[in-house]
């Protein structure tokens, strides 16, 4: 089956996207807690610690990104959790936030997206 621009097996689809009729698991953490822990690890140059808060399917991608010191320095400028602005689209398994930052002396909007796994744990899906 095709989901967006990606071909997936039925098994992969059902693993990644929960049954909409299934009960939502009780959350074991919050997106805000995940963000704070991720930010603390990034600021401490603890890449492996930060990767614990990235969605498992995205960890290798982010591990490669963080190996570039210039990219890592950019991630170390992410703001305190209090500066995150809730996005307009949210559901039981996904929530997005935005924050403002600067790039090349221009103010930019950035996104942080979180997803909950089937066990009730939130992870960063995009930052």
Image (cartoon, helix red, strand yellow):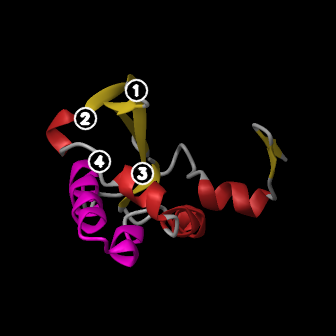
Residue bearing the label numbered 4: 77
Residue 39 painted magenta: yes
Residue 120 painted magenta: no
State the residue lying farthest toward the left. 82
Mark sitting earlier along the chain (1/4) = 4
Q: CA distance from mark 1 to mark 3?
A: 34 Å
Mark closer to the observer (4, 3): 4
Whether residue 3 can be seen here: yes
Where in the figure is residue 31, as x and y percent of width and height? Answer: 29, 50
Where in the figure is residue 62, as x and y percent of width and height? Answer: 53, 62
Residue bearing the label numbered 2: 84
Count residues near mark 4 (Cα–Cα under 10 Å), then give few for <14, some for 14-19, many for 20+.
few
Residue bearing the label numbered 3: 23
Give the residues in magenta: 30-52
Count residues near mark 2 (Cα–Cα under 10 Å), then give few for <14, some for 14-19, many for 20+.
some
Question: Magenta residues: mostly which secondary structure?
Answer: helix
Q: Is residue 23 left or right of residue 77?
A: right
Which quarter of the picture shows residue 72? Answer: bottom left
Q: CA distance from mark 2 to mark 3?
A: 28 Å
The numbered disc on residue 109 is 1
Q: CA distance from mark 1 to mark 4?
A: 13 Å
Q: Residue at x 19, y 34 (%)?
A: 83
Count residues near mark 3 (Cα–Cα under 10 Å), then give few for <14, some for 14-19, many for 20+.
few
């Amino acid at each position: 089956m095709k989901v967006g621009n990606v071909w997936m097996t039925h098994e992969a689809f059902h693993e990644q996207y929960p049954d909409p009729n299934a009960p939502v698991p009780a959350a074991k953490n919050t997106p805000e807690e995940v963000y704070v822990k991720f930010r603390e690890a990034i600021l401490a140059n603890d890449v492996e610690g930060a990767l614990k808060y990235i969605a498992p399917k995205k960890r290798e991608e982010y591990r490669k990104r963080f190996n570039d010191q210039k990219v890592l320095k950019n991630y170390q400028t992410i703001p305190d959790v209090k500066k995150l602005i809730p996005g307009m689209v949210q559901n039981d398994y996904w929530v997005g936030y935005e924050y403002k930052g600067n790039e090349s002396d221009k103010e930019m909007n950035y996104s942080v997206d979180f997803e909950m796994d089937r066990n009730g744990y939130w992870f960063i899906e995009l930052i």
